[in-house]
Image: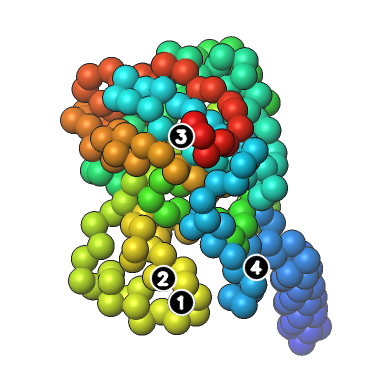
């Protein structure tokens, strides 16, 4: 009887292990099948084109942003981030961004803007469909100084994502304006030593930006005029509200106008 119980127990252990192995294999298969899952982007170093280094072309869509600290202009990239750019243009043309707040200013590195409330939180009753735009990443877009990025609003994680990582990332109406971190000698050495994409490292060293933000947010545009305003917005006196470094004095987005680039303007 004892031997029979031992055999039964052993069989149960083996069956349990087989079930766990099958479950693990299934999860790994799902992970491989959905490896990108809007979390990472496949990068081919040989085909990377740093489009933000190119000046705007005649007729390119642009945004003209008037703030209480001055005006800046950026070219939009609907060919790379179509859903986020469409969302931004629609909101801008509806007047949504008029009299919204710059609600975060982080140590000269970047700022965040486009919120109806100074706290950075959306008001009750806000259109949540505007905040669930799937994140769009591209090997050709990077967080250089002057980049304009849609802020991540939420991450949807299922059972598989909790086990193997990843998730579906979404962004919305609020946006980040990238200025630059301080490039210490150590950071410069690390970038110079990275030869995976030489032009990328050189671009960060020349233009500035936030390398650690790479492939983390949807880039919707690149500032080509008013970088001094971008720097000023990132360097405000602030007070933390526990989530954001909120400017002490109100700094507003007066308006956002969608237009087309012309060298004559």
Cβ–Cβ under 8 Å for marks 4 and 3: no
Whole-number angstrom distance, CA of label 3 to CA of label 2: 25 Å
Cβ–Cβ under 8 Å for marks 1 and 4: no
Placement of 196 over or under 253, stated as above or below: below
Q: Which residue is mark 1?
A: 198
Q: Element at badge 1?
A: helix
Cβ–Cβ under 8 Å for marks 2 and 1: yes
Q: Which mark is residue 73?
A: 3
Which residue is located at x 62 percent, y 57 percent?
138
Q: Earlier in the sequence, mark 4 or mark 3?
A: 4
Q: Which residue is mark 4?
A: 42
Q: Earlier in the sequence, mark 4 or mark 2?
A: 4
Q: Which mark is residue 95?
A: none
Whole-number angstrom distance, CA of label 1 to CA of label 4: 17 Å
Which one is closest to the eye, mark 4 or mark 3? 3
Placement of 254 over or under 203, stated as above or below: above
Whole-number angstrom distance, CA of label 4 to CA of label 2: 18 Å
Left or right: 63 in relation to 202: right
Which one is closest to the eye, mark 3 or mark 1? 3
Q: Residues within 10 Å of mark 4 (few under 14, many from 20)?
A: few
Which one is closest to the eye, mark 4 or mark 2? 2
Q: Element at badge 2?
A: helix
Which residue is located at x 42 percent, y 54 percent?
144
Quadrant location of residue 4?
bottom right
């Amino acid at each position: 009887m004892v031997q029979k119980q031992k055999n039964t127990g052993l069989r149960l252990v083996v069956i349990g292990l087989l079930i766990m192995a099958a479950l693990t294999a299934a999860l790994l298969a799902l992970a491989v099948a959905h490896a990108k899952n809007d979390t990472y982007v496949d990068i081919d170093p040989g085909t990377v084109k740093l489009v933000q280094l190119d000046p705007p072309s005649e007729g390119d869509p642009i945004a003209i942003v008037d703030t209480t600290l001055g005006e800046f202009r950026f070219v939009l990239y609907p060919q790379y981030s179509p859903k986020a750019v469409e969302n931004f243009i629609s909101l801008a043309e509806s007047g949504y961004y008029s009299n919204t707040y710059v609600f975060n200013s982080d140590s000269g590195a970047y700022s965040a803007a486009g919120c109806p409330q100074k706290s950075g939180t959306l008001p009750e009753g806000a259109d949540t469909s505007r905040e669930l735009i799937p994140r769009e990443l591209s090997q050709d877009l990077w967080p250089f100084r002057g980049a304009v990025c849609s802020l991540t609003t939420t991450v949807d994680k299922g059972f598989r994502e909790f086990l193997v990582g990843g998730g579906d990332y979404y962004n919305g109406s609020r946006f980040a304006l990238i200025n630059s971190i301080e490039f210490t000698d150590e950071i410069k050495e690390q970038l110079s030593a990275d030869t995976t994409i030489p032009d990328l490292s050189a671009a960060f060293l020349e233009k500035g930006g936030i390398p650690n933000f790479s492939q983390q947010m949807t880039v919707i545009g690149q500032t080509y005029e008013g970088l001094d305003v971008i720097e000023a917005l990132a360097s405000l006196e602030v007070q933390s509200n526990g989530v954001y470094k909120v400017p002490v004095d109100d700094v507003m987005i007066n308006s956002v106008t969608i237009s087309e680039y012309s060298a004559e303007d």
